[in-house]
Amino acid sequence: MSSSTYEERRQILEQDFLLGKLSRGEIDTLLAYSRVDRYPAGEEIYAKGSPGQSMMVVLRGTAKMCSGSLDGKEIVLNIMHPGEIFGEIAILDGKERSADAVAMSDCELLVINRRDLLPMLERHADMCMILLVILCQRLRQTSEQVEDILFRDLEARIAKNLLHLAETSGFDSKEGLSIDLHLSQRELGNIAGGSRESVNKHLQSWHKTGWIELGKGSIVILDIAAIERLARR
């Protein structure tokens, strides 16, 4: 994976929903104080309960926010793509991390320390409001995920999460709507709240019906209407 250039990092910050509110000079200052960390696929970025004194911007790759149990079960709370931020709760309260963060693919992250960003937030009230909007979105997403696990069956949850992945990282191919995240069926199960075996059973059934095409680390949705019907159940 090639490293991002200074100009690419600046462009990502300028286009960010939150950090794009800063002036060009403030962005240059933030870049001067920040650092770039790289993580191979599968490596932990930080652990739940660890000190939280920084926020990350994804420059390359994808990362997941997740929480695990003592018996090895895991639930994926969110997947972060290039240009997106995570760890923002620590910017506000400086307390311990509320979830684990793990690199899903080889990742390059821009790490912004709380002490460097807080003075800028104090000068930009609009950025504080945007942070609140981001936190509200995260809370709504988590609440919806809990409701889905409690009230929807697994097949509907898998369909809903496939559509979400298609919306955030899918692209049109000649076969259909392709999702190429190198996402294993176990990880899809962790997102939908089911076992790898149960997820595989539904995916194989959809494949035989002609709704999807399965590849190594990829899924192509051939019949989007059928998957949407399942997601609405």
Image (cartoon, helix red, strand yellow):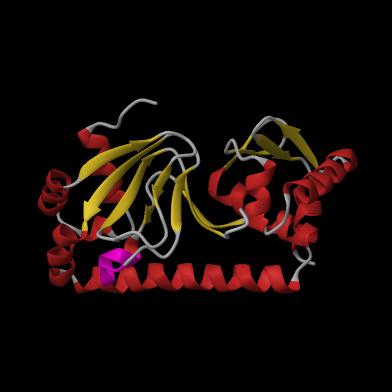
Q: Compared with residue 206, is residue 156 higher up or lower down, i.e. above or below?
A: below
From the top left corner, tell me how far across and down residue 199 is, in percent.
76, 49
Seen from the viewer's position, the closer of residues 205 and 233 is 205
Quarter holding the C terminus is bottom right
Quarter holding the N terminus is top left
Describe residue 184's horizontal placement relative to residue 25 as left or right: right
Taking the spot 67% from the left edge, 57% from the top edge, the residue there is 192
Write down the region rendered in magenta.
89-95
From the top left corner, tell me how far across and down residue 194 is, in percent.
72, 56
Describe residue 127's horizontal placement relative to residue 187 as left or right: left
Q: Residue furthest top?
A: 2
Residue 110 magenta:
no
Taking the spot 33% from the left edge, 65% from the top edge, the residue there is 96
From the top left corner, tell me how far across and down residue 60 is, in percent.
39, 37
For residue 32, what is the image quadrant?
top left
Q: Residue furthest right?
A: 209
Q: Compared with residue 179, is residue 138 higher up or lower down, i.e. above or below?
A: below
